[in-house]
Image (cartoon, grey):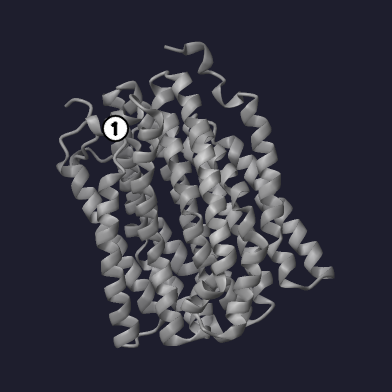
Amino acid sequence: MEQSSKGTKLLNGSIWKGIVSFAIPLFLGNLFQQMYNTVDSLIVGNYLGSDALAAVSSSGSLIFLLVGFFNGIAVGAGVVISRYFGARDYENLRKAVHTDVAFGLVAGAILTVLGMVLAPQILVLMGTPESVMPNSISYFRTYFAGSLAFVMYNIVMGILQAVGDSRHPLYYLIFSSVINVVLDLLFVGKFGWGVGSAAAATAISQAASALLCLIRLIKSEDVYQVRLREIRFHGTQLRQIIQIGLPSGLQNSIISIANIVVQSNINKFGVMAVAGCGVYSKIEGFAFLPITCFAMSLTTFIGQNLGARQIDRAKRGAVFGILCSVSLAELVGLFVYFLMPYLAAAFDSSPQVVEIATRQAHVEALFYCLLAFSHCIAGILRGAGRSTVPMLVMLASWCLIRITYITVTVHFIPKLEVIFWAYPITWSISSVIFFLYFVRGKWLYGFEGSRS
């Protein structure tokens, strides 16, 4: 089998065209993926009311705590695969692909058990309002009953993206998003089965997209084809995946713990605060799409080009990706700042919920450029195999400093705005540290002397 031409656009030709053509399907794919949780909240809020919406919102940080760890490992696998692809080392590429799939199967099973068992205990520790606790547990446990689908989707999608194919995951996401909307309307709107059925609709939809991606890999005739009989762990590739992916996974999970602390403080302000901040977080998820798509694009672009020892091309691509992401993020921030009252009302027309969501937007939205910069540098560093650096920076700023600031300040100034300001403050700190690291060129240590 020869190298597919689909992935070579990141290694040859126009840098900006390669990155943008790869990033656009990622953006659209993330847009539809964001619809999973957003449609749940939109339909739950309109059909079941603010208490049910608060139950869905209160589960978000807890879900990412467990899912984020395994998604971080998947990022590491993508970097390993993109490196082998760029270097045209197809034997090790195949081993990495099959190791990645094996890891996903095991991780999905583990996540199912953890999610089902730990849900009530963690929700209690978070101080989830008692009135929404039954619905929160129902939503959480149903969501994690479909863990294998969530994990495998991220694994197989990551393989396709690592070799430069962001188009097919987009097609599958569009299809599964339609399924999700239809099932949500049926389960919640027509049959009135409650918040657990919204999670079930999401799980079924993710399973559909995971299956389509896996079929694509199995039927492919390219170098990254998946053969069921070859799915197993290969020691060298597994160590590389863990080495690069473990810091990302730990970072995701520990930052999620920080977000759980944030959510616990929000819970103290009552159900309306939980619902209002939950609405804002759903809208913010869309605002972050330009940020995440460029960060993901840069990880693959840097991984492939450093694997091919194209150092100057990697540098130019990094600068272009940063500028695009920061600019788009700030434009979206302005949009959110001015239109939040209308956007929030689509989820929950309660004046108090809309007012809280708007207050949060007016604190955070104009600082999205800082978040974009931090994510882009983190993506570049992961593509260069230096995932420990973003882990340490983000844990220090987005976890330790954020928790300390909120714990101390809310005690003396018990206002929601104090919690909202935790995000711009910690984004600023991480941006300064990343900027100093990036401009000194430390991310290229070990590659500069091997230029082709």
Relative placement, left or right, of 203 versus 439 is left
User: Is the C terminus in the top left, top right, bottom left or bottom right quadrant?
Assistant: top left
Quadrant location of residue 140? bottom left
Residue plotted at (34% across, 65% down) = 146
Tell me where residue 339 appears, x and y as whole percent.
54, 68
Q: Decide: is 204 above or below 250.
A: below
- Residue on which the image places disc 1: 7
Q: Secondary structure at mark 1?
A: helix
Q: Decide: is 232 above or below 254.
A: above
Tell me where residue 436 appears, x and y as whole percent.
68, 32
Front residue of 111/186: it is 186
Relative placement, left or right, of 381 versus 261 is left
Quadrant location of residue 366? bottom right
Quadrant location of residue 48? bottom left
- Can you see residue 171? yes
**Which amino acid, by three-letter code, is at mark 1?**
Gly
